[in-house]
Amino acid sequence: MISIGICDDEPSMRKSLRAPLEQTLQLLGMDYQIFEYNSGENFLRSEMAQWLDILFLDIEMKGRNGMDTAKALRRQNTHTVLIFVTAHPDFVFQGYEVHAFHYILKPYEEQKIKNVLKQALAELGKNTEQFFTLEQKSGTYKVPLKEITAFSSDKRKVVLSLENGTKLDFYGKLDTVAKDLPDYFVRCHNRHLVNLNFVTALEKDICICKNLAFPVSRAYRQSLEIAFARLLLR
């Protein structure tokens, strides 16, 4: 279980930070708890102050500011990964004093939040294997992304192809699925997303992915070729 705190005196800022954190943690298949605090005083009085794995801390708050809160936190523990959030980058340099791990500038960029969270998890030594969660009538399934060769749209459903040849389908849209996938999933056609790690050949109009052949449309051919070439050069 990963425990994360968000300390900010603005409810809207806590909400906009929490959403991408939850999205990322769910994608990673991690059990988590997120605790919210509206002031440095409330955070320091909480039972979790000494036990949080990660804390996102606003520097500019009414009452006890974030820097003073961080100093008090460090007197209690040294293990919490501290990430400052601020609208003014000048404050960031003060973070060295309290061993801040990173910082995020307001207004928030979702991708920045996700990237910093993953770095913090790596710092903690947590398992960051990514999963895709899908709903079927029989229940909810978490499938490791590294085992998925492709996603394909089929009317109102999306078909997920696995490395072992298994296929799973669920109701959804390919565009929605594509938004939260890592960059090694690339579109080769309006109806198909392939995992570049399984692509063995690109022909004129065909992409060979594991033992499957997917059509390559003119609209996506160039971007697919560039992405495949970059993967080969790693």
Image (cartoon, rainbow, N blue to C red):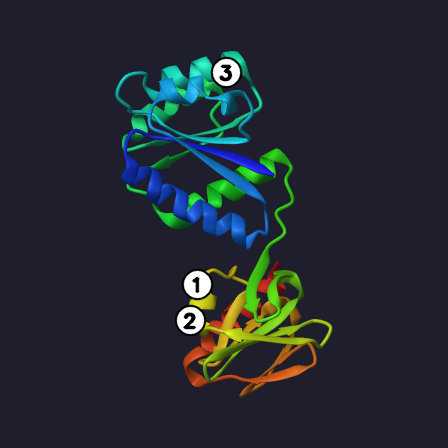
The picture quadrant where one finds residue 194 is bottom right
Badge 1 element: helix
> Within 10 angstroms of label 1, few (less than 14), some, or many (20 or more) residues?
few
Disc 3 from disc 2: Cα separation:
44 Å
Which three-letter amino acid code belongs to the residue tagged 2?
Asp
Q: Is residue 186 visible in the rendered structure shown here?
A: yes
Mark 3, secondary structure of its residue: helix
Is 38 positioned to the left or the right of 29 in the image?
A: left
Residue 89 in picture, x, y percent from top left: 31, 30
Contact (Cβ within 8 Å) of mark 3 with mark 1: no
Answer with mark 3 or mark 1, whichever residue precedes in sequence.
3
Tag 1: residue type?
Lys
Q: Which residue sits at x=54%, y=26%?
A: 80
Find residue 215 and report its horizontal and vertical position in percent: 54, 86
Q: Distance between the residues labelled 3 and 1?
A: 38 Å
Residue 106 visible? The answer is no
User: Where residue 175 is drawn, which disc sits there?
Assistant: 2
Q: Which of 181 and 97 is in front in this view?
A: 181
The quarter of the picture where the C terminus appears is bottom right
Q: Mark 3 points at which residue?
A: 74
Residue at 52% from the left image edge and 59% from the top image edge? 182
Q: Locate residue 158, reporting x and y percent.
A: 52, 76
Q: Is mark 2 on a helix, strand or loop?
A: helix
Q: Where is residue 113 in the image (x, y as percent from the top left)?
A: 42, 44
Sequence-wise first label, 3 or 2: 3
